[in-house]
């Protein structure tokens, strides 16, 4: 009916609510996209620091690059899992690319890439650093654990990193799964 005309007979004008709803899967899609974007921010910030650490080492060892700042930090050499984790920007790029047109297949690639280049390297690092953590916990003074600036043990920094990174990756995978479910076509019996 016209908004200026006479109201339809048999209605008081409050029956519009059933026609003015956004479908639940569209609401979920918008909500999960927003949440994922917020998880990508800290992931990217951590990634920048890892790129600086690993990149500076690559420049020093392969190209003879010298920098007083990185020399003063006295960082230990990078572990192999760190190189792999540096590629964890790939799931972010894939997920953001899938958001524009709800590309389910690309979101699935992002989901599995999150595990392969995010969680898996962290788990390898977690297991690889465990003996070093035990050695440090048993003898803090006499331990040969590499340190940050000669003071703070790197193994503690790594375990803080693992705690944060695994939560970011785990929640990202959780929300990617639910976003994929919101995008999936409805199965009719």
Image (spheres, rainbow, N blue to C red):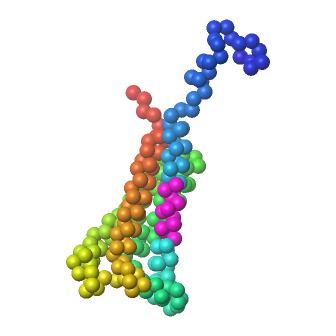
Viewer can see residue 76: no
Residue, x 43% and y 44% (percent of image)? 178
Residue, x 74% and y 12% (percent of image)? 6
Q: Main secondary structure of the magenta part?
A: helix
Residue 54, position in %: x, y? 46, 78
Which segment did they paint magenta? 38-48
> In the depicted view, which residue is nearer to us: 187 or 68?
68
Residue 77 placement, left or right of 51: left
Residue 183, position in %: x, y? 49, 41
Residue 3, position in %: x, y? 74, 20
Residue 124 placement, left or right of 43: left
Residue, x 67% and y 8% (percent of image)? 9
Query: Against 21, is 68 above or below?
Result: below
Figure quadrant of the N terminus: top right
Query: Residue 16 magenta-drawn?
Result: no
Query: Against 182, is 45 above or below?
Result: below
> In the depicted view, which residue is nearer to us: 114 or 170?
170
């Amino acid at each position: 009916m016209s908004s200026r005309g006479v109201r339809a007979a048999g209605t008081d004008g409050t029956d519009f609510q059933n026609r003015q709803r956004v479908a639940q899967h569209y609401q979920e899609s918008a909500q999960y996209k927003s949440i994922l974007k917020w998880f990508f921010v800290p992931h990217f910030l951590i990634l920048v620091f890892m790129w600086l650490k690993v990149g500076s080492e690559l420049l020093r060892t392969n190209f003879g690059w010298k920098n007083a700042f990185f020399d003063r930090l006295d960082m230990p050499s990078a572990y192999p899992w760190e190189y792999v984790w540096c590629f964890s920007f790939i799931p972010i790029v894939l997920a953001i690319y899938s958001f524009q047109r709800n590309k389910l297949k690309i979101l699935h690639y992002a989901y599995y890439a999150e595990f392969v280049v995010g969680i898996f390297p962290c788990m390898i690092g977690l297991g690889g650093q465990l003996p070093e953590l035990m050695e440090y916990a048993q003898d803090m003074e006499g331990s040969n654990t590499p340190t940050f600036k000669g003071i703070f043990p790197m193994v503690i920094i790594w375990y803080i990193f693992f705690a944060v990174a695994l939560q970011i990756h785990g929640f990202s995978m959780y929300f990617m799964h639910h976003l994929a479910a919101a995008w999936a076509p409805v199965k009719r019996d």
